Image (cartoon, rainbow, N blue to C red):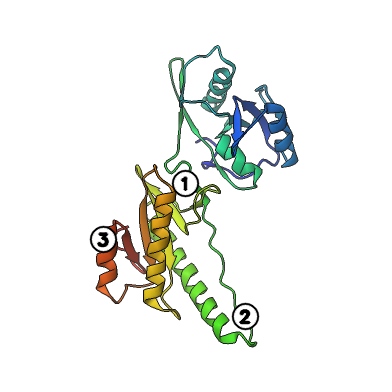
Amino acid sequence: MGNCNGWVTSLKGEDATITGRVRIGNEHVNQTECMRRAKTKGAHRAATDISSSTTLLIWGGLPVNVVSDPDREYSRKLIKADDRRRDGDHVHVVDEAGFASLLRRQPAHCLRLTKARRTVVVERPEGQGILGGPLKIRKPTTREGNALTVDLSKLDAATEAHEKTLRALERHLHGHDIRVHAPLNTAPRFDVGWANGSRVFVGEVKSLSATDQDQQIRLGIGQLLDYQQQLLPQKVTPVLILERKPRDQRWRDLCHRLRIVVTYAPKFPDV
């Protein structure tokens, strides 16, 4: 993708151009207001015209992904952005959901464009509307003794195991050229997500140290079923990711009946 790694991380310093109608949340925002908001988040310039200095094109809400009328304003802008890319001068392209993420100081997908004759196709990334920016794994914390030492020590041990399992999963998937993602800001707050081909996975990580194993697994299954329901009508594959192999076979049998993938460190079978 030229000089782009697939993500726009910030509006800061960008020379932004806006095309089409932009919806942020449930509100249609006119282009003047979009330009104002972009500049408050650090955009160097925000305009409705595309120029040789444009570095970011914000693609407003079109009903289709194929733009075939070069006489219309938003078509011309996409065609110009695609031509610039073909000349080796990369222009980021984000949709209205991506713009909303950037306004929240969260990363956005840079959309791919393909061109055939007079048609520009905007390629939606896998996991559109579900997967957000690259996952940032936190460092576990430690706490000193006080009246709550026992409870907090158990909490921290569980947190450390949780993050260790996440890091191990990230390495495992990276070995298969798969990126892990945080949830998009409008999606349920699952722990980790990824796409493999046309399939989109959402995962919940559960540590099994210093806690009741059955309770943790039961909680994870409930969360995954809730995420799956919230994301309808989109189809996702829920994944229960455990610190280690569960000691009771019934949990794997239950997950199989519910069509939940269950996997565990260190080798993460079935993912």
Could you tell me the amino acid type at mark 2? Arg
Element under disc 2 = loop
Residue 238 shows up from this direction: yes
Q: Is residue 40 left or right of residue 79?
A: right
User: Which one is in front, 90 or 229?
Assistant: 229
Q: Which residue is mark 1?
A: 130
Element under disc 3 = helix
Could you tell me the amino acid type at mark 3? His
Q: Is residue 99 left or right of residue 12?
A: left
Q: Position of residue 233 (x, y in %)?
A: 39, 42
- Name the residue: 26% across, 60% down: 256
Q: Which residue is mark 2?
A: 143
Q: Quadrant of residue 49?
A: top right
- Name the residue: 47% across, 47% down: 131
Residue 178 shows up from this direction: no
- Name the residue: 49% across, 68% down: 163
Q: Which residue is mark 3?
A: 256
